[in-house]
Image: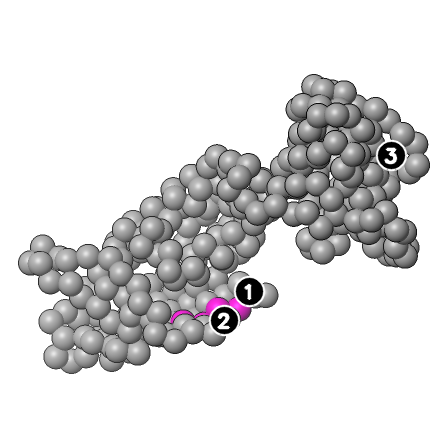
């Protein structure tokens, strides 16, 4: 006889975020309630051998064991097994992540195992135990991941992107809070400073000038945007943002929808010094 459990939970977050967060082994003590410590023994970009230590039980004993885990970001599948089996003859684990909607994921855990003949409990007892614990841990993970998506992201908490001019910070994004349909942030421009011309093949952009004023060149046509005013930049329209004033400008931006892949979402048509760059065909981009 082989023990078998199969549990799933639906999480209101994109599959990429759920996959990334639940496979960040170093963060498991903040994601699960049962683990007191995670020690990484060996690791590669897609695998790890690690030791897990539980919180002490009612008798004050802390259980621990070593496991091996490997993950495939393309298929969003994870396979793992216990290296130190303890009371198990074997324990094999499969995790899968199914995108139900862009912001909703079904995470499933399947476990196959067999207890050793001299183990203090049998397969049926362990099946019930794993099922109870999996349901509880999935509930906690769902709650914590969904709460992380609504956390406040301060401007200074993310690194500045200055490659195209200005001090640009992307605050709300798939990589920060798991946004599923768009992203946004703010750019600070000193007097005379410019964000080099570019366009977005898949997204329209919304600009709001929080302080100062800017000039936006839209396919070569200059538009002045004053403080507390907004501007729509349609998809595929080349645009350059310049601060022509004497005071620093703060511009809030938001783009939607997301491009199919991040590298497709932005096309530069000039470098940071204003020199033209060869642009790809817009339809193929």
Question: Which label belongs to residue 46?
Answer: 2
Decide if residue 13 is on the left or right side of residue 166.
left
Residue 136 visible? The answer is yes
User: Is 70 colored magenta in this rendering?
Assistant: yes
Decide which of tag 2 and tag 3 comes sooner along the chain. Answer: 2
Report x, y in % for residue 33. Answer: 27, 51
Q: Nearer the viewer, mark 1 or mark 2?
A: 2
Decide if residue 61 is on the left or right side of residue 68.
left
Q: Which residues are magenta?
A: 69-73
The residue lying toward the viewer, choosing from 187 and 171, is: 187
Q: Where is 246 relative to 16, above or below?
A: above
Q: Which residue is mark 3?
A: 217
Q: Quadrant of the C terminus?
A: bottom right
Question: Residue at the location (15% across, 80% down)?
Answer: 117
The local secondary structure at tag 2 comes to loop
Q: Quadrant of the N terminus?
A: bottom left
Question: Which label belongs to residue 115?
Answer: none
Q: Which residue is mark 1?
A: 73
Report x, y in % for residue 55. Answer: 19, 57
Decide if residue 93 is on the left or right side of residue 188.
left
Decide which of tag 1 and tag 3 comes sooner along the chain. Answer: 1
Q: Where is 271 relative to 123, above or below?
A: above
Report x, y in % for residue 189. Answer: 70, 35
Decide if residue 152 is on the left or right side of residue 50.
right
Question: Residue at the location (15% across, 58% down)?
Answer: 56
CA distance for labels 2 and 3: 44 Å
Residue 129 visible? The answer is no
User: Is 159 colored magenta in this rendering?
Assistant: no
Decide which of tag 1 and tag 2 comes sooner along the chain. Answer: 2
Is disc 1 in contact with disc 2, using a CB cutoff of under 8 Å?
Answer: yes
For this orientation, the residue located farthest to the right is: 220
The local secondary structure at tag 3 comes to strand
């Amino acid at each position: 006889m082989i023990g078998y459990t199969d549990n799933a939970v639906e999480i209101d977050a994109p599959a990429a975020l759920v996959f990334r967060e639940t496979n960040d082994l170093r963060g498991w003590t903040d994601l699960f309630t049962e683990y007191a410590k995670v020690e990484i023994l060996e690791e590669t970009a897609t695998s790890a051998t690690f030791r897990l230590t539980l919180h002490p039980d009612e008798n004050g004993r802390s259980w621990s064991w070593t496991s091996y885990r490997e993950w495939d970001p393309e298929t969003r599948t994870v396979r793992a097994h216990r290296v130190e089996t303890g009371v198990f003859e074997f324990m094999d684990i499969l995790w899968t992540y199914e995108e139900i909607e862009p912001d909703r994921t079904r995470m499933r855990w399947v476990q196959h195992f067999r207890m050793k003949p001299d183990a203090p409990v049998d397969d049926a007892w362990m099946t019930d135990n794993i099922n109870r614990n999996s349901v509880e841990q999935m509930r906690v993970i769902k709650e914590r991941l969904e709460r992380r998506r609504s956390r406040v992201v301060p401007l200074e908490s993310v690194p500045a992107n200055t490659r195209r001019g200005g001090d640009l910070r992307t605050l709300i994004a798939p990589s920060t809070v798991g946004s599923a349909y768009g992203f946004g942030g703010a750019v600070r421009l000193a007097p005379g400073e410019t964000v080099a011309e570019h366009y977005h093949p898949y997204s329209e952009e919304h600009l709001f000038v929080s302080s100062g004023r800017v000039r936006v060149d839209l396919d070569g046509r200059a538009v002045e945007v004053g403080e507390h005013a907004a501007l729509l930049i349609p998809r595929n329209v080349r645009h350059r943002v310049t601060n022509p004033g004497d005071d620093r400008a703060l511009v809030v931006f938001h783009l939607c929808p997301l491009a199919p892949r991040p590298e497709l979402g932005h096309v530069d048509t000039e470098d940071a010094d204003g020199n033209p760059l060869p642009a790809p065909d817009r339809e193929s981009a």
